[in-house]
Each structure stands twice: as structure tokens, then as C-alpha cells.
Image: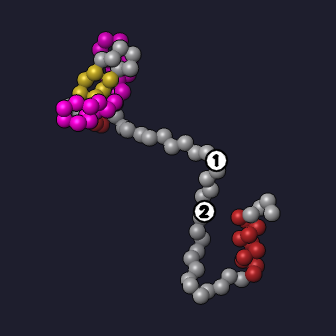
């Protein structure tokens, strides 16, 4: 992690347009100081780009316990158990 030489705040990775297209720079959001990103191996190893995914709580995760082949049947008991598990409010 690098710090701004002017104000000692953390330098963050930002994308900037220039003649080559979009390039990554390390930028201080407080004072505007910039320096090129990736100029050394230290830059690449000390920064990790992450994207935070927000969940709404409405998503459900389905776990497949087994697979059924075309033409196979499910027992009445298994069907009721699945309905009870996946539709608890009904």
C-alpha cells in the first residue's frame, strides 16, 4: 500500500483516460496527487482490486442433492418432502 507524499493519505487505484486509452493510476482523493500504477512489481502485489456485490436477501441458493433422468419418477413421499421444504408457508 502506498501513501501520498504530500498529505499521507492512502493512494487508491483509479482509471484515467489518456492518449493510450484507459490506464490505471494511483490517486490521492484528498489532494489529487497521481502516479502511474503498475510501474513496479510492488504495486501489483500490494493492491488487490475487489468488487463488492450487494445481496438483497431475496436470492435463494438451491442445493442439488441428486439428478433425475428423463423417464424416472419421484415417490409421493419424496415429492411431499420437497414441497414442504421449498414451500414452508403453504
Tell me: 39 left or right of 81.
left
- Mark 1 Cα-neighbour bin, 10 Å: few <14, some 14–19, many ≥20: few
Question: Of all residues shown, which one is farthest toward the right?
Answer: 90
Quadrant assignment for the N terminus: top left
Whether residues under marks 1 and 2 lie with C-beta atoms below 8 angstroms apart, the answer is no
Residue that badge 2 annotates: 62
Q: Residue at x 34, y 34 (%)?
A: 47
Above or below — where is 6 with respect to 76?
above
Q: Earlier in the sequence, mark 1 or mark 2?
A: 1
Where residue 70 appears, as percent x and y from the top left, is: 56, 85
Tell me: 73 left or right of 67.
right
Q: Residue at x 61, y 53 (%)?
A: 59
Residue 19 part of the magenta segment: yes
Q: Which mark is residue 72?
A: none
Quadrant assignment for the C terminus: bottom right
Where residue 84 appears, as percent x and y from the top left, is: 76, 67
For marks 1 and 2, give the CA distance. 14 Å
Task: Please report the bounds of the magenta region as a residue range.
Answer: 1-24
Q: Residue at x 71, y 64 (%)?
A: 86
Secondary element at tag 2: loop
Where residue 16 appears, as percent x and y from the top left, is: 29, 30
Question: Of all residues shown, which one is farthest toward the top?
Answer: 6
Above or below — where is 22 with respect to 85?
above
Secondary element at tag 1: loop
Residue 22 part of the magenta segment: yes
Above or below — where is 62 with respect to 24?
below
Taking depth in this image into account, of 41 and 61 the one nearest to the observer is 61
Q: Which mark is residue 57?
A: 1
Q: Is residue 49 visible?
A: yes
The part of the image, by quadrant, that contains residue 23 is top left
Amino acid at each position: 500500500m502506498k501513501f501520498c507524499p504530500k498529505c499521507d493519505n492512502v493512494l487508491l487505484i483509479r482509471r484515467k483516460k489518456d492518449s493510450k486509452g484507459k490506464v490505471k493510476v494511483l490517486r490521492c482523493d484528498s489532494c489529487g496527487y497521481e502516479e502511474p500504477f503498475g510501474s513496479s512489481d510492488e504495486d501489483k502485489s500490494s493492491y488487490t482490486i475487489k468488487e463488492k456485490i450487494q445481496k438483497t436477501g431475496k436470492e435463494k441458493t438451491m442445493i442439488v442433492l441428486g439428478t433425475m433422468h428423463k423417464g424416472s419418477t419421484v415417490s409421493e413421499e419424496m415429492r411431499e418432502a420437497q414441497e414442504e421444504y421449498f414451500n414452508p408457508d403453504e
